[in-house]
Amino acid sequence: MPTQQSPAGATLRAPQGTPDAKSPNGRAIGPDVERWRCPAVLRVKSVVVAAAGAAIAAVFFPPWFGIPVAAVLAAWGLGLAALGASVAVDRAAGTLVLRMGLVVRRVRLADVTAVLVDQAKVSIGRANGGEVSIYAWRKSPLDALLRVPAVAGDIGHAIASAVALAKAGQDLDPEAAADPEAAAAGARPASPGRSPARARSRLATALLGGAGALAIVGALVVRVHWHNPVLTVLSVILALALGVAGLLYLLVALWILLTGHAPRTIAR
């Protein structure tokens, strides 16, 4: 399985032909389904953040812009509070399921080409698509203060082990051996010259650019004229923050569109 190193991350290589399973080599197998769920404190945090964002949108934006933004934030916060975030590795079914509130991504283990762990971020490169990432679970100083566990390393190792097991089972599948053309069609490698660990799908790039454009629009429509000087200062800070963030999002999206990979992390 191809791997790629990152200045700030560690790439986990699944051993080829040596799955982490109870086999003739005597190694112990893990459960068929391994699951990690985010702690309850992150669900509470999502509700608080969504409520604060919805209140800011209702106060500082005009109704035609603030109401849809508040509705989206409320849906995100309630979805994450009700369903939570989780990672499930199903060895028997050969699937990896990533959930973040209302958003669910399913990835075939046989399609995984690389697993990259960068602090709290787990990135999964796929042969037939862009990179999928999730934070598990500590990604900010506030999360550390709330004693949120950091389990990205455990999840990365479990995924790499399950991928090795899936690829070994695929190699030993008698049906695949009897029909090599079908096996080759089902296991399409990544296109040459493309880095699976850094690739981003066009949809993700479009969403990133759309978020940047939306932030810039929000900066332009923020209500900055108030009788209260405190609200005026807060609205100006909000407009500047949205404008800078939106510009950065657009620049990153443009960089990915032109180069095919995300900006490199600068090693400190």
Image (spheres, rainbow, N blue to C red):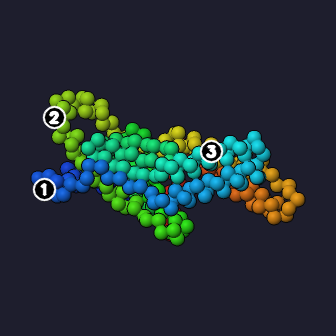
Q: For the point 33% across and 43% down, which residue is it? A: 95
Which of the two discs, 2 and 3, labels the residue nearer the N terminus? 3
Disc 3 designates what residue? 72
Distance Cα–Cα, label 3 vs label 1: 52 Å
The image position of residue 256, as x and y in percent, is 54, 46
Disc 2 designates what residue? 174
Residue 67 shown left or right of residue 40 in the figure: right
Distance Cα–Cα, label 2 vs label 3: 49 Å
The quadrant where residue 152 appears: bottom left
At label 1, the amino acid type is Asn
The quadrant where residue 93 appears: top left
Which of the two discs, 3 and 1, labels the residue nearer the N terminus? 1
At label 3, the amino acid type is Val
Given contact means CB atoms under 8 Å apart, are the residues at marks 1 and 2 in contact? no
At label 2, the amino acid type is Pro
Residue 110 shown left or right of residue 219 in the figure: left
Distance Cα–Cα, label 1 vs label 2: 21 Å
Disc 1 designates what residue? 25
The secondary element bearing badge 3 is classed as: helix
- 10 Å crowding of disc 3: few (<14), some (14-19), many (20+): some
